[in-house]
């Protein structure tokens, strides 16, 4: 094998196959003669094979300028020799994708090189525990960021969600497909593994949660004889019975102690409150092992030798996939359509949905604009994703495009328009998202490589892969690292050179004045937002006071309550106002209903104050507008240019951290209204839950009605006060964080002259070259 072929494999990140190509004596001449069968034998896995085929196709088409970046060792003459300009391709033109991959590779290479320089500098730093040396070590460590973007994937059973995820990452057997009853409780996270094995990390619910579930079922059975025989079961108890059968088998009703160790011999980790880790060499073998923790089948179709299914005990599953290039900076999350009745799983579900930067809604292409379940999923999660979260993009993914009667671009564009129109008209979604957040894609039912006859504008699997690639801006990420490294090295070099003490004192005082002045500007913007919120909340309180009893009645005395509503209402009060029935029925959240007019009053202002879009910052972009004017100061204090370079990079880093704090805290602030209402209703729930016997339904309702009538003024005023208090706390925390961090950086960078620190001039020069190189890219 020659360097030409080796370069291709390296650029495609297929180093693992170099030995195979060498063994088969594939060289420059034979490379272009490889057929489909030959390539499949050389690269058995679909994902890696697809990358190689794209690169090979690109070479054959002679994408000259683009390939200069991809294969610098390949001559232009060779490219022209194998080019076929007139040749058509059923795949989308790969040149753009290959070029981006090549550019990302360049950025990654630069960051690796700069990191080597910083590792050397860290080794040079003495073991001294002086404030300055400790400060430098901390700053070097802070250069590393490992943030992953979360992509949540929703979709009803049968829509092709698992097939889509498998196909996207090139692993046909990672998630189960064609399973009649997939797991509807635990979330499944998929990310890249740095090791060569496939891994499943299984997190269990707590023992206390499990005891509570089966205990509530036993209590139900004891009291069943007292229930009205006309009442219908909403399925809650039946669901617990199904879980108990899965874990213990059919004989569980005769067991005395369901928590004895003997029942959990296969999963001692559950009793130890530890995750269970499974490792296998292939995705297929991994699926065979972790299946019993995710499939809801209990007796039907179970694998020979499997006696129990542990899905009821699972909180979440993390699947780690080796050589998953698309997932290097992304975690895909296969999500149930709504939260769970189990508190632990519900908490995990909500936390993940709140932290998703992108959400995919998977639905069949023939019913994308009208499928009730898909739109209900999006509506129910919209507040968690929008004002209560950080979602920036919503993608409707219409599967089974090859099932359309007319598989063409015009047909799919019409479907996309219908979805966009439905999105535009949905009032609940519009509270949290603009139309610009939505994109619609169509994909085939099968793996895209098996459907190459489809127009690439119809089967847009390749576009979704690009979406994952683009979630992380490699240039920005690398530039942030290199700029930060340049700043730290500039500071060290400046401290070693020393300087005029009077000038340092002068600029330090000037910078402290700028910090105070700029923080006042940020404070003003935050105060304006608080006043706007207070005005909105005053209106919300007034509306809530006038309508709360009507809202309460809509939940506790609905027109179509049916014979089984007594059980439903009892479930509501026993679970602090929240009832999650089995699949097919909407959840009931009395606390959210009572707080709905308060939330509605602030929704628009909240989205304006805390936008999720990357290009817009919180509080009318006040944090991003903050500036130390280091460029202007450099002209005045030329001798202190190195220290000012450091302070400029510090300013950007600190603003990023403060923005992240605000983004996280705003989620808590948004839900404070509902949480306060729940807290104020707890006493009523407790008293109502204790009501038994004759006329209990009537007494339940009267207890709740009386409590709301007597405490509504205090309840809504306290909810308003709590939100405003949290907003004020966020203001003070953000300003203190920014001011303290900048003051520390200013004082340490301008008060230190230390000729004993190491000489880093060579490392600084090397990093400067990479910095200039990045600016030119």
Image (spheres, grey):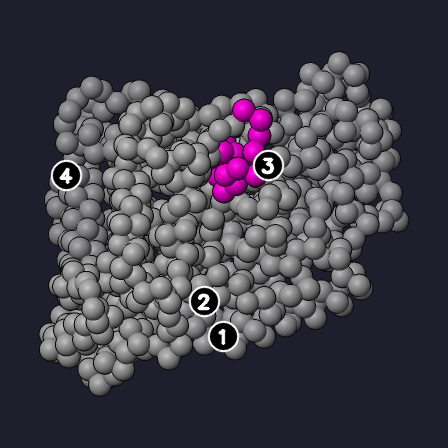
Residue for badge 4: 751
Tell me the residue that label 2 is attached to.
379
Q: Nearer the observer, disc 2 or disc 3?
A: 3
Label drawn at residue 740: none
* Residue 416 figure quarter: bottom right
Image coordinates for residue 481, horizontal then vertical, percent:
40, 39
| Cβ atoms under marks 1 and 2 closer than 8 Å | yes
| 50 shown above or below 118 | below
Please say if 243 is above or below 355: above
Disc 2 from disc 3: Cα separation: 35 Å
Residue at image point 52% right, 41% down? 297
Q: Would you name the residue on which mark 1 appears?
A: 426
Q: Is residue 297 above or below residue 304?
A: below
Q: Which of the two marks, 1 or 3, is nearer to us in this view?
A: 3
Label 2 or label 4, whichever comes before in sequence order: 2
Q: Is residue 218 left or right of residue 748?
A: right
Q: Earlier in the sequence, mark 4 or mark 1?
A: 1
**Which of these two is toward me, 194 or 421?**
421
Instruction: Work out how far the residue at label 1 is from the one at label 3, CA to CA, in angstroms.
Output: 41 Å
CB within 8 Å, label 2 to label 3 = no
Q: Pointer 4 and pointer 1: residues touching (CB < 8 Å)?
A: no
Q: Dot 3 lies on which element?
A: loop
């Amino acid at each position: 094998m020659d360097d030409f072929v080796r370069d291709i494999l390296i650029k495609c990140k297929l180093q693992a196959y170099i030995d195979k190509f060498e063994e088969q004596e594939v060289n420059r001449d034979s490379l272009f003669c490889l057929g489909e069968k030959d390539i499949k034998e050389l690269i058995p896995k679909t994902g890696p094979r697809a990358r190689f085929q794209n690169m090979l196709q690109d070479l054959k088409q002679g994408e000259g300028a683009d390939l200069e970046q991809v294969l610098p060792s390949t001559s232009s003459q060779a490219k022209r020799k194998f080019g076929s300009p007139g040749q058509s391709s059923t795949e989308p033109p790969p040149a753009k994708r290959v070029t981006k991959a090549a550019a990302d590779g360049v950025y990654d290479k630069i960051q690796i090189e700069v990191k080597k320089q910083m590792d050397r500098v860290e080794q040079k730093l003495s073991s001294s525990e002086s404030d300055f040396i400790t400060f430098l070590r901390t700053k070097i460590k802070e250069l590393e960021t490992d943030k992953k973007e979360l992509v949540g994937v929703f979709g009803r059973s049968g829509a092709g969600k698992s097939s889509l995820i498998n196909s996207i990452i090139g692993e046909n057997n990672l998630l189960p497909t064609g399973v009649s009853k997939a797991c509807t409780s635990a979330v499944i996270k998929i990310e890249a593994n740095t090791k060569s094995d496939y891994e499943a990390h299984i997190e269990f619910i707590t023992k206390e949660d499990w005891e509570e579930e089966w205990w509530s079922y036993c209590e139900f059975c004891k009291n069943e004889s007292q229930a009205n025989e006309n009442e219908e079961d909403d399925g809650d108890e039946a669901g617990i019975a199904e879980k108990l059968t899965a874990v213990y088998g059919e004989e569980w009703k005769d067991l005395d102690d369901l928590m004895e160790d003997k029942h959990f011999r296969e999963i001692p980790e559950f009793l130890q409150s530890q995750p269970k880790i499974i490792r296998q060499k292939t995705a297929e073998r991994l699926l065979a092992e972790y299946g019993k923790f995710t499939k809801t089948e209990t007796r039907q179709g179970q694998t020979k030798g499997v006696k129990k299914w542990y899905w009821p005990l699972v909180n979440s599953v993390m699947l780690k996939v080796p050589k998953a290039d698309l997932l290097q900076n992304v975690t895909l999350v296969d999500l149930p359509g709504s939260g769970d009745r189990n508190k632990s799983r519900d908490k995990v579900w909500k936390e993940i949905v709140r932290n998703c930067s992108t959400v995919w809604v998977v639905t069949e292409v023939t019913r994308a604009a009208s499928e009730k379940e898909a739109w209900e999923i999006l509506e129910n999660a919209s507040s968690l994703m929008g004002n209560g979260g950080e979602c920036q993009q919503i993608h409707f993914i219409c599967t089974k495009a090859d099932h359309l009667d007319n598989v063409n671009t015009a047909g799919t564009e019409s479907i996309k328009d219908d979805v966009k129109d439905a999105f535009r008209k949905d009032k609940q979604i519009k509270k949290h998202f603009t139309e610009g957040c939505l994109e619609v894609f169509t994909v085939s039912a099968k793996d895209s490589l098996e459907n190459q006859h489809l127009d690439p504008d119809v089967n847009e699997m390749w576009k979704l892969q690009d979406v994952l690639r683009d979630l992380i801006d490699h240039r920005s990420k690398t530039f942030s690292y290199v700029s930060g490294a340049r700043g730290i090295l500039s500071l060290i070099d400046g401290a070693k050179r020393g300087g005029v003490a009077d000038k340092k004192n002068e600029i330090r005082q000037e910078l402290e004045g700028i910090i105070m002045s700029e923080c006042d500007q940020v404070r003003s913007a935050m105060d304006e937002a608080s006043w706007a919120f207070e005005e909105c909340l005053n209106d919300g309180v007034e509306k809530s006071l006038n309508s709360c009893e009507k809202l309460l009645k809509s939940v506790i005395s609905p027109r179509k309550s049916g014979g089984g509503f007594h059980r439903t209402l009892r479930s509501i009060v026993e679970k602090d106002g929240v009832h999650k029935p089995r699949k097919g029925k909407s959840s009931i959240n009395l606390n959210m209903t009572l707080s709905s007019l308060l939330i509605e009053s602030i929704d628009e202002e909240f989205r304006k104050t805390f936008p999720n879009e990357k290009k817009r910052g919180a509080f009318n972009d006040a944090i991003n507008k903050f500036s130390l004017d280091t460029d202007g100061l450099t002209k005045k204090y030329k001798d202190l240019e190195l220290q000012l370079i450091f302070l400029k990079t510090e300013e950007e880093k600190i603003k990023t951290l403060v923005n992240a704090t605000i983004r996280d805290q705003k989620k808590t602030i948004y839900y404070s209204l509902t949480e306060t209402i729940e807290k104020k209703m707890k006493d009523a729930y407790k008293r109502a839950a204790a009501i038994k016997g004759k006329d209990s339904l009537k007494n339940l309702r009267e207890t709740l009605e009386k409590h709301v009538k007597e405490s509504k003024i205090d309840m809504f005023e306290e909810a308003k006060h709590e939100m405003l208090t949290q907003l004020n706390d966020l203001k003070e925390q953000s300003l203190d964080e920014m001011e303290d961090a900048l003051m520390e950086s200013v004082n340490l960078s301008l008060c230190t002259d230390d000729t004993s620190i190491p000489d880093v001039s060579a490392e600084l020069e090397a990093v400067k070259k990479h910095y200039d190189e990045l600016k030119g890219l």
